[in-house]
Amino acid sequence: MSGRLYVHYQQQLIGQIQVAETGLMQFTYAPEWLAASNSFPISVSLPLDGSYSALTSHHFFANLLPEAETRQQICAALGISVGNDFELLTAIGGDCAGTLSVDSVRSSEATAPVPGYKPVADEQLKRWVVGKRSVFSTITGQQQVRLSLAGAQDKLPVHVLGEQIMIPVDGAPSTHILKFPSPHFSHLPENESFVTLLAATVQIPVVSLHLRPVGTGRLAIIERYDRMRDNQGYRRLHQEDFCQALGINAANKYEKEGGPSLHRCSMIVRQHTAFPLLEIQKLLKWTLFNWMVGNADAHAKNLSLLYDADGTIGLAPFYDLVCTRNYRALARDLAMGIGGTFNPDFIGKPQLAALAVDFGVQHRLVLDVFDQLLDAIPGSLDTVVAEWSSRYGSSPILARLPLIIRRNVRRIKTQWRVTST
């Protein structure tokens, strides 16, 4: 183990990571970055004055790494211990979420290779769709491919040009994310695309997602919101998820396991975004929408701060929207409680009143958004089914998800009447 990594923003050195005696990844800003006119803290949890702990910096960089089975398969393929965050970051930290890249050499110490893209053949895509091994683990860390993407679902950062899908090599930026069918949860890409389309229909800002048929399955192709086209190609935009912003380990992303609450997430929005009142309303709509459509997996890593090119901070478009209630094996309790309640079937008037307090807004605003979504979601389902089927054809989710969501909304209305009497 070299014990040192260098963190770059574009070609500028931001700082370095060293392994402390405790085994934690200790990040320190480089003097030249602190003196630069365009410097910024890479996280609201890592201020430029260095007033943060090794544990906080470790959690920030560990949150860039894959989780769960995908992580296990990558580590097995690369011969790295599953718990070794530093060596895994060394192997795959070349193209992280946001602007950062992590390397074992300073950019000034070596001639940077020419970034490029490696085309993926259609036959390879077909094998990936039907395969049961993580696609991410078969690609990243091999040869000149160094890609890091957080999360437990099997997904792959790629570049898309027309119909051609390509793998970034030698530090080229990815522009899209592929998500693959799951061997455990049926029609997962279709589920996510349907719920994302429904969210957009009820005026919730979401990522751009479309499905691509490959063989007998479908891939979800998501345009990265942290990439921007410019005259030189693609520019990376900085971002951080809310576990990073709060200095929390990804393993504790659920509130019941020590992760962030909606109150803590709302405080991040209030303290660090350019237009906090507008962003709080977005967060409120996201919270109530997930509850109403049966998405119990809306945790803090599914929220991110996006730093625009001029440094303005706002909420990133929402992503990873899935009706988890479609899968019996998944937990029903919410990842973040609403008004202190995690069971979605027992949220009523008292919990929404407490949610207003948590968000620091008038109770009337919560009720207005609640009433709006309670009408708009079931009222939009037929339109969404028609639009989805016109784009992609038939799928079992077209019958199942509207049924689940309508039933969920009826349950909420019943609970609301009970708690209002």
Image: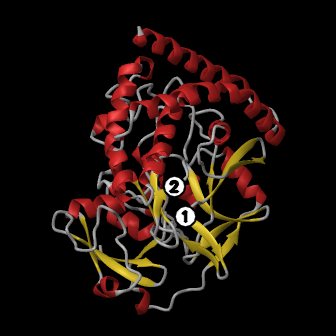
How packed mark 2 is, by other alpha carbons closer than 10 Å (few <14, some 14-19, many 20 or more), is many
Task: Name the secondary structure under disc 1.
Answer: loop
The residue beneath circle 2 is 316
333 vs 20, left or right, is right
Camera-side residue of 67 and 379: 379
How packed mark 1 is, by other alpha carbons closer than 10 Å (few <14, some 14-19, many 20 or more), is many
Instruction: Write down the quadrant of residue 109 in the picture.
Output: bottom left
Which residue type does callout 2 highlight? Ala
Q: Nearer the viewer, mark 1 or mark 2?
A: 2
Q: In the rendered image of this protein, does residue 274 appear above or below residue 116?
A: above
User: Mark 2 and mark 1 in contact (Cβ < 8 Å)?
Assistant: yes
**Residue 156: x, y in percent?**
58, 57
**Residue 138: x, y in percent?**
56, 58
Q: In the rendered image of this protein, does residue 167 appear above or below residue 30?
A: above
The residue beneath circle 1 is 226
Q: Residue furthest left?
A: 21
Q: In which quarter of the image is the C terminus?
A: top left
Q: In which quarter of the image is the N terminus?
A: bottom left
Instruction: Write down the quadrant of residue 117 in the picture.
Output: bottom right
**Residue 420: x, y in percent?**
42, 12
Q: Which mark is residue 128?
A: none
**Residue 323: x, y in percent?**
57, 31
383 vs 82, left or right, is right
